[in-house]
Image (tube, helix red, strand yellow):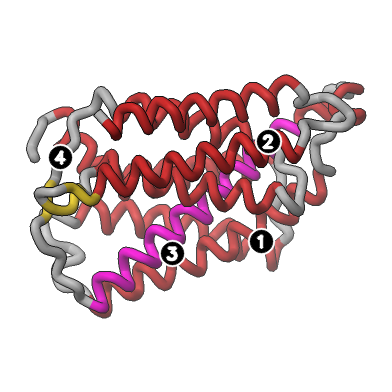
Amino acid sequence: MLVISLSILASIFYAFATGHVLSRLFDKQGPSQKKTLLLSTAAILVHMLVLVNSVFTTNGQDLSTVNVAMLTCWLIVVSVTAVSLKFPATLLLPVVYGFAAILLIASLFIPHHIIMHGINIDVGLVTHISLSLLAYCVLIIATLYAVQFYFIDKRLKNRDIAIVQSHLPPLMQVERQLYQLLTIGTVLLTLALAAGFVFLDGMFAREFIHKTVLSLVAWAIFSTVTIGHHFLGWRGKAVVITIMIASGIVTLAYFGSRFIQEVILLKF
């Protein structure tokens, strides 16, 4: 009951934050940073309480796909909110806040109970998982920047006066931050895969091969785009779409099979 109440409360705060930002999306002054920060901070804190009560149960640790997804979402929300304090992120905030609200409500209806009575702490495994989670968060944020770049670029090409007079960040600034995040995320993904091959056995075992192959495919795409941008000057719509596709592949690698097994097939 506590988790249900906290999830609803967090989603309400996220919804209010989303509504506030969207209501002033094309306003010259932009949304009130103080009000946005107040609402988002409340949502983030309650979201954290949801995670604590969902993961750490009396029977053990619940590390289901839904809980891992909520943790990843929380990390992304915290990161984007922190970035917004220094750089304009008017388009990113309603996306991450809105998704967090939807995920919290959806988690109440999706069965998820993978109880682990004890966690075997292995340095190699912890290193691989930590780097993988960090890489995923950074790459998803980079993808959000890619979406923001695509949106602003399209509106500018259509000579939309509202976009020029809005509080949205300059296109070149968005592009610069996009490729900085892409580079960092690609490096982290490289380290995560390297840690997996060095420290773990069975990366190509039957139950893990699809994750490994999809991760390698995504890594190849991200690496190609990163190298192409830095050395060949690649940029524009085609690159942005490629980044989105690679993010979809890495999401499928991280969550696809577990989601099917735990949620659709109910194999707990």
Q: Earlier in the sequence, mark 1 or mark 2?
A: 2
**Residue 34 location in percent, x, y?**
74, 39
Compared across the picture, whether 39 is left or right of 23 comes to: left
Residue 46 is situated, as x and y percent measured from the top left of the image, at: 44, 40
Residue beneath the point at 87% across and 32% down: 29
Mark 3 → mark 1, Cα distance in angstroms: 14 Å
Residue type at the position of mark 2:
Thr
Q: Disc 1 or disc 2, which is closer to the eye?
A: 2
Q: Which residue is mark 1?
A: 180
| Distance (Cα) linking label 1 and label 2 | 26 Å
Q: Residue at x 34, y 27 (%)?
A: 5
Residue at image mark 3: 189
Q: Quadrant of residue 24?
A: top right
Residue 216: image quadrant is bottom left
Queried whether the magenta region covers residue 142, the answer comes back as: yes
User: Which residue was labeled with disc 4?
Assistant: 113
Q: Residues within 10 Å of mark 4 (few under 14, many from 20)?
A: some
Q: Say what amino acid the circle numbered 4 marks.
A: His
Task: Examine the rendered structure and indicate whether residue 13 appears above or below residue 114.
Answer: above
Pick whichever of labels 3 and 1 is earlier in the sequence: 1
> Mark 3: which amino acid?
Leu
Q: Compared to 97, does 210 lie above or below? A: below
Q: Is residue 160 visible?
A: yes
Q: Disc 4 or 3, which lies upstream in sequence?
A: 4
Return the x and y of residue 112 as percentages of the image width and height: 19, 36
